[in-house]
Structures are given as C-alpha cells and as structure tokens.
C-alpha cells in the first residue's frame, strides 16, 4: 500500500480464517522512500525484502518478498497509485487455492496546510485475485478510508474499514490508528524509523483479533534512488488467531531487511 509498506491481513477458517503490508510494506510505500532527483508526476518503486509484514503480521509466512508500484501525483495535491506484493496467507489457509498476490489501488488528496503541517486523506482498496478459493470463506478484499497528518518527522494516521477486514467475518467498521516517526539523523543519510499502531477488529465473532504492533529501525540512503532499511517488528497478536500452517505466531517479533529502488 503506499506510506504503504507495510498490511494486516487476516483470514477466517470457518468464521475466522488463519492469517498469514518486507520491511517495506505498510503496504503501499516505504517508511522512508529513497530520494529521486527531480521526480516528475509519475514515480515508481521496487523492493526486495526478507519478509512482507503488514501492521506487524506476516503476509508471506516469513518468506522473502518482491514488491513494487506506481504513483501519479498532480501539482494540485490529488494522487492515485497502485502497489503489489507476493503473499501466501490466503493459499496457506485454503490449500489447493491460488492467491499469490496482493494488489492495492488508492487515491486521495495531500496538501501542506500550514508551515510544516501536511494533511492527507483518501481511499485504499486491497484486492486479492484468487482461483479455486472456497466460497464458504469470507471475501478477503478490503476497502479502507484514511486520514493522516504529518508535522515535522511525525505522522499520525487513522484508517477505517467500510467492508469486512481481510476475511474476518462481520468485521466492517474495524480501524487502525498508528503513529510513525521518521527522524533524519543528519549522519550519512541515515533516518531513524519508529512506529506503534493499534488494529481494532470489529465484530463479536472476533474477540481476540485486535492487537498492538510496533517497530524500530534505520533507513540508509544509498544514492541514485536506492535505500536499504533494517528494523525489528513485534506485536502482541494472539498466536491462536494469527497462526501459520506450522503453528507459528505470524505476529511474533522478528528482524527485517529490505532494499528499495525508486524511479
């Protein structure tokens, strides 16, 4: 997703599917995108990562990921974009099905409204092309509205699901609140990254699905639109809800590394 590099994805296996956003991904966009000299209205990015984590939850069952997207930003402040990543959580939860990719489509308006203060709002569609997917399981496609404010190096963002959330039955009205800090240390192109978020999963059928996630990390600008990022990500997610086919908690703490090239 963009500012999207990091996606919670959940799933129901009956009512609740087991769930499986790389360092990159609160699914469209990196925490600290690589600088591109004199970017035009259309930009692109590609990332190779050790894993795809979204809102702290593994989307690729702890396996490497390749991600990429495109953005168009008008000088008025309006923008649209697409971001994509390999995933495994859907096919892990429904063996025999095919669901290898997450495709995110988004659009919104972003504008500096006062010195140092930027507001951003829009809509984000998470789309999962599937085949042979059990019709009894809840549709994983998800639509969220979001609003964010950035002042200096801090961004506060609120997302609200107007559909069921990532396959959780009866979860319309779920929300995610997160605070991200990206502080330029002024040393060798190094940015200090910090994040804490709370995923609220609505619905009486999902009493143990809500959780908090956090991250600390560093991003290093390598020049020529490239960067490398390392981080430690953790959550207090319930390991009986967010569980891999081998019984591992998909929200357990882990270190991540990613390489991003922006065009």
Image (spheres, rainbow, N blue to C red):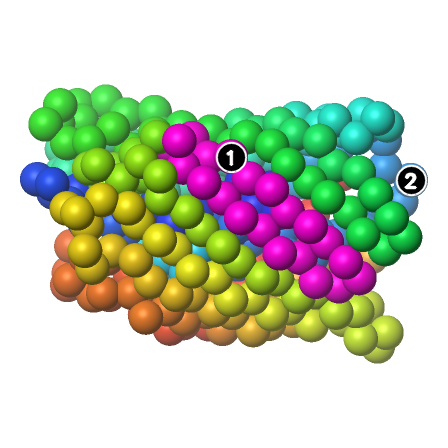
Q: Quadrant of the N terminus?
A: top right
Q: Viewer-proximal residue, 21 or 61?
A: 21
Res. 15 image quadrant: top left
Q: What is the span of residues highlighted in magenta in the rendered image?
A: 142-162
- Mark carried by residue 177: none
Q: Viewer-proximal residue, 183 or 174?
A: 174
Q: Residue 199 location in percent, x, y? A: 39, 55
Res. 86 image quadrant: top left
Residue at the location (17% across, 47% down)? 204
Residue 189 visible in the current orientation: yes
Residue at the location (27% across, 40% down)? 171
Q: Residue 84 location in percent, x, y? A: 50, 35
Res. 93 image quadrant: top left
| Residues marked 2 and 1 touching at CB (< 8 Å) | no
Residue at the location (47% across, 29% down)? 125
Q: Residue 30 location in percent, x, y? A: 62, 51
Q: Does the magenta portion include 8?
A: no
Q: Viewer-proximal residue, 76 or 204?
A: 204
Q: Is residue 51 left or right of residue 157?
A: left
Q: Residue 211 location in percent, x, y? A: 33, 62
Dot 2 lies on which element? loop
Question: Which secondary structure class fits the magenta region best?
Answer: strand
Q: Is residue 116 left or right of residue 13?
A: right
Residue designated by label 2: 38
Residue designated by label 1: 145
Residue at the location (77% across, 58% down)? 151
Residue 91 visible in the current orientation: no
């Amino acid at each position: 997703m963009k500012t999207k590099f990091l996606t919670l994805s959940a799933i129901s296996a009956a009512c609740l599917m087991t769930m499986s956003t790389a360092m990159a991904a609160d699914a469209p966009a990196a925490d600290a995108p690589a600088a591109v000299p004199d970017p035009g209205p259309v930009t692109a990015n590609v990332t190779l990562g050790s894993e795809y984590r979204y809102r702290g939850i593994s989307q690729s069952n702890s396996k490497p990921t390749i991600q990429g997207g495109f953005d168009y930003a008008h000088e008025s402040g309006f923008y649209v974009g697409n971001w994509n990543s390999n995933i495994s959580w859907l096919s892990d939860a429904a063996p025999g099905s095919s669901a290898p990719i997450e495709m995110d489509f988004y659009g919104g308006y972003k504008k500096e409204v006062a010195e140092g203060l930027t507001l951003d709002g829009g809509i984000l569609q998470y789309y999962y092309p599937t085949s042979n997917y059990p019709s009894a399981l809840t549709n994983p496609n998800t639509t969220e509205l979001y609003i964010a404010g950035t002042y200096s190096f801090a961004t506060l963002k609120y997302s609200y699901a107007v559909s069921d959330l990532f396959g959780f039955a009866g979860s319309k009205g779920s929300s995610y609140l997160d605070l991200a800090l990206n502080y330029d240390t002024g040393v060798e192109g190094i940015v200090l990254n910090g994040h804490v978020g709370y995923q609220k999963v609505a619905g009486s059928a999902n009493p143990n699905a809500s959780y908090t996630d956090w991250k600390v990390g560093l991003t290093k600008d390598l020049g020529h639109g490239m960067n490398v990022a390392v981080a430690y990500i953790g959550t207090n997610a319930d390991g009986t809800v967010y569980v891999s086919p081998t019984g591992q908690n998909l929200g357990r703490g882990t270190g991540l590394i990613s390489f991003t090239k922006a065009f």
